[in-house]
């Protein structure tokens, strides 16, 4: 035996088989309820901004645009029953909505001046109800928003009264 090592054989490339395409169409992925709610919120916020214009509902600051233009709730979005309620959400400036955490006292006074006490009491009563959104309900509201604002308001009040 000698100390000389034999050279290693060079590996040959493996023969590749062509990829087979599936003969059946791909299944549509199920959209989660959370994803549907995010889509509904983005469409709803755009609707509110278009409806109210670029003026803050609370402090009346004009010329809102970009990241300073929010759609803010009087009753928190955590209350699912009023999260997408048209009279609960208005155009807000970043200062009122973020820095002043909703500026609730001023928002409430403006709401009472605009809509009156009976509508305010109805909003507060609606916020006490427990609501669990279902995927078909959210899809219906998304379709209504894509149609237009009036269709959305009709669909919302049909679903939630």
Image (cartoon, rainbow, N blue to C red):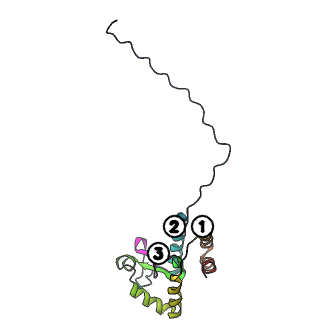
User: Where's residue 121, x and y in %?
Assistant: 51, 90
User: Where's residue 29, x and y in %?
Assistant: 59, 55
Q: Earlier in the sequence, mark 2 or mark 1?
A: 2
The stretch in magenta equals 61-79
Question: For mark 3, what is the residue?
Answer: 78
Find the distance from the CA under tag 3 to the CA under tag 1. Answer: 18 Å
Question: For mark 2, what is the residue?
Answer: 38
User: Where's residue 144, x and y in %?
Assistant: 62, 73
Residue 83 drawn in magenta: no
Quadrant of the drawing holding the C terminus: bottom right
User: Which residue is farthest top?
Assistant: 1
Question: Disc 2, disc 3: CB below 8 Å?
Answer: no
Q: Earlier in the sequence, mark 3 or mark 1?
A: 3
Q: Secondary structure at mark 1?
A: helix
Q: Earlier in the sequence, mark 2 or mark 3?
A: 2
Q: Is residue 7 above or below residue 88?
A: above
Question: For mark 1, what is the residue?
Answer: 135
Q: Secondary structure at mark 3?
A: loop
Q: Residue at x 68, y 43 (%)?
A: 23
């Amino acid at each position: 035996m000698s100390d000389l090592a034999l050279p290693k054989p060079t590996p040959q490339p493996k023969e590749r088989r062509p990829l087979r395409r599936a003969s059946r169409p791909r299944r549509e992925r199920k959209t989660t309820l959370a994803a549907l709610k995010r889509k509904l919120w983005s469409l709803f916020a755009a609707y509110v901004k278009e409806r109210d214009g670029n003026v803050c509902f609370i402090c009346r600051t004009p010329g809102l645009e970009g990241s300073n233009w929010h759609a803010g709730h009087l009753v928190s979005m955590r209350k699912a029953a009023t999260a997408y309620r048209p009279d609960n959400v208005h155009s807000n400036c970043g200062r009122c909505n973020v820095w002043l955490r909703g500026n609730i006292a001023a928002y409430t006074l403006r709401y009472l001046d605009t809509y009156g006490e009976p509508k305010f009491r109805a909003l507060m009563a609606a916020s006490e109800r427990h609501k669990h959104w279902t995927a078909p309900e959210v899809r219906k509201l998304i379709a209504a928003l894509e149609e237009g604002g009036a269709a959305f308001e009709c669909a919302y009040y049909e679903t939630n009264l």
